[in-house]
C-alpha cells in the first residue's frame, strides 16, 4: 500500500494528491459542485459506505475545502459547503472531466456542462463554445449527454 504522504518529494502535485488524490474524495468534491450538501444526500448520490463518507467529509473540512454549516439544532445536523479553496478546484475538476470525455467516453460524454446564460457548452479552455465568455461553477449546469445511462439501469 502506498503511503498517504510524500514527505520526500518537494512537489506541489504530490502535496495536492495527499489531499485530493483519492477516488472517493474527488467524487465527494464533484458531488458538492453538483449542489449536494447533506450527508444523507452524499451517501445516496455516491453509494459509498457511510464511515468512508464521514472520513472524507471530515478530511475535506480539516483541509478547508468544505465547511460544516449547521442547518438544524435538534437533532444537530450539518450541511457541507465548498469554501473558496474548494471552489478553486473547479478548473481542475473540469479539466479531468474533459480528459475523461476525450479518452473514456465511448458513447459520448455522460454529461454536457452547459452555460446557463446561452445554452452553449464548456470548452477545454473553460469558456462557452457559443458566446465565448469565461465560465465558472456558478455559470454552468450539467445536462445529460449522449453517453448518459438512463435511470434504472
Image (cartoon, rainbow, N blue to C red):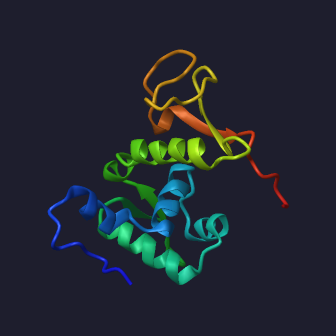
Task: Give percent across and percent down for residue 64.
Answer: 30, 61
136 relative position to 116: left or right: left
Indicate whether 114 appears above or below 22.
above
Indicate whether 36 appears above or below 131.
below
Image quadrant occupied by the N terminus: bottom left
Task: Give percent across and percent down for residue 57.
Answer: 44, 70
150 relative position to 131: left or right: right
Q: Residue at x 37, y 53 (%)?
A: 86
Q: Residue at x 52, y 54 (%)?
A: 30
Q: Residue at x 75, y 39 (%)?
A: 146
Task: Give percent across and percent down for residue 46.
Answer: 62, 67
Residue 61 placement: quadrant: bottom left
Indicate whether 129 appears above or below 112.
above
Image quadrant occupied by the C terminus: bottom right
62 relative position to 52: left or right: left
Is 107 or 133 nearer to us in this picture?
A: 107
User: Can you see residue 71?
Assistant: no
Is 65 or 113 nearer to us in this picture?
A: 113
Q: How many marks?
A: 0
Q: Residue at x 44, y 57 (%)?
A: 81
User: Can you see residue 149?
Assistant: yes
Q: Residue furthest top?
A: 131
Task: Give percent across and percent down for residue 33.
Answer: 51, 50
Indicate whether 142 appears above or below 78.
above
Amino acid at each position: 500500500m502506498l503511503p498517504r504522504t510524500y514527505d520526500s518529494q518537494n512537489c506541489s502535485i504530490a502535496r495536492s494528491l495527499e489531499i485530493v488524490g483519492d477516488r472517493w474524495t474527488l467524487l465527494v468534491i464533484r458531488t458538492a459542485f453538483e449542489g449536494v450538501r447533506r450527508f444523507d444526500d452524499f451517501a445516496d448520490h455516491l453509494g459509498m459506505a457511510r464511515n468512508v463518507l464521514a472520513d472524507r467529509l471530515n478530511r475535506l473540512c480539516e483541509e478547508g475545502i468544505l465547511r460544516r454549516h449547521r442547518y438544524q439544532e435538534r437533532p444537530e445536523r450539518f450541511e457541507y459547503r465548498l469554501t473558496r479553496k474548494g471552489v478553486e478546484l473547479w478548473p481542475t475538476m473540469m479539466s479531468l472531466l474533459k480528459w475523461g470525455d476525450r479518452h473514456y467516453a465511448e458513447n459520448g460524454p455522460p454529461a454536457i456542462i452547459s452555460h446557463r446564460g446561452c445554452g452553449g457548452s464548456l470548452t477545454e479552455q473553460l469558456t462557452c463554445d457559443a458566446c465565448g465568455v469565461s465560465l465558472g461553477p456558478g455559470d454552468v449546469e450539467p445536462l445529460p449527454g449522449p453517453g448518459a445511462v438512463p435511470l434504472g439501469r
